[in-house]
Image: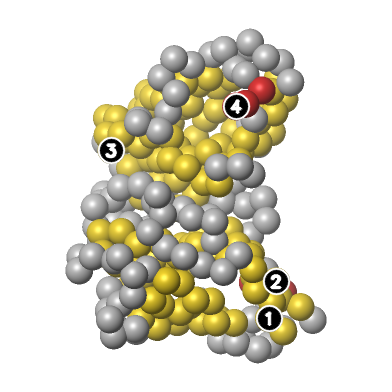
Amino acid sequence: DARVTQTPRHKVTEMGQEVTMRCQPILGHNTVFWYRQTMMQGLELLAYFRNRAPLDDSGMPKDRFSAEMPDATLATLKIQPSEPRDSAVYFCASAQGSTDTQYFGPGTRLTVL
Amino acid sequence: DAKTTQPPSMDCAEGRAANLPCNHSTISGNEYVYWYRQIHSQGPQYIIHGLKNNETNEMASLIITEDRKSSTLILPHATLRDTAVYYCIVRVYNQGGKLIFGQGTELSVKP
């Protein structure tokens, strides 16, 4: 049963620290999305890639967030420095080509103290 | 911004059909209606999508009105495991882009 995996599942850190979240898309999927979910804002897209190239990162705070795909099996989302307002659940999703069925991972719950 | 309006919450008795409405009065001719759900603490899960014809799969049925301004997701025999937040999303098919989630409907299935 192919699934999107995310690590870590939970992360507690202190303000100012660097946080790196990882996502392994479903094998063969070439489109990867990063979403963030908070109680106030709900689910919102941060960035997405196709064939490892960034297509849209307009939802991402540029000064502290960065997203990359070092290879086809790994996507990373980094926050440096982290702030308490970054506390949220971060979801990764993957899809095959331009089809619209996005498969979501279990999420990384981030708490910044 | 989300282009859909859904009731914030609904209840359904276990074993009965759950009918979740969605209004999308500004939908464009090339936009499809998608439904996802999110069970507590899990990632969203795709359910079904359609353009103008009714659709059915192993999870649910989707009924779209003739003017396409509203739709209803039907879970024919709701179980406790169907308790979740259900999101109705409109977007152009096969563009592979972002999903714009609204607030969704929190469905509680009760014994």
Alpha carbons under labels 3 and 2: distance apart: 37 Å
- Residue type at mark 1? Cys
Mark 4 on the same chain as mark 1: no
Q: Is residue A58 left or right of residue A13?
A: left
Q: Is residue A98 above or below residue B59?
A: above
- Labelled pair 1, 2 in contact (Cβ < 8 Å): yes
Q: Is residue B39 above or below residue A68?
A: below
Mark 3 on the same chain as mark 2: no
In terms of secondary structure, where does tag 3 sit?
strand
Foreground tag (1 vs 3): 1
Foreground tag (3 vs 2): 2
Instruction: Return the chain for callout 2.
Output: B
The circle on residue A50 is 3
Query: Which corner quadrant of the image does residue A38 belong to?
Result: top right
Q: Nearer the viewer, residue B45 or A7?
A: B45
The residue carrying mark 2 is B108
Tag 3 or tag 4, which sits nearer the N-term? 3
Mark 4 on the same chain as mark 3: yes
The circle on residue B12 is 1
In terms of secondary structure, where does tag 2 sit?
strand
The residue carrying mark 4 is A86
Query: Which corner quadrant of the image does residue B11 belong to?
Result: bottom right
Query: Which corner quadrant of the image does residue B64 belong to?
Result: bottom left
Mark 1 on the same chain as mark 3: no
Neighbourhood count class around disc 1 (C-alpha, 10 Å): few under 14, some 14–19, many 20 upward: many
Q: Is residue A13 left or right of residue B34?
A: right
Alpha carbons under labels 4 and 2: distance apart: 30 Å
Neighbourhood count class around disc 4 (C-alpha, 10 Å): few under 14, some 14–19, many 20 upward: some
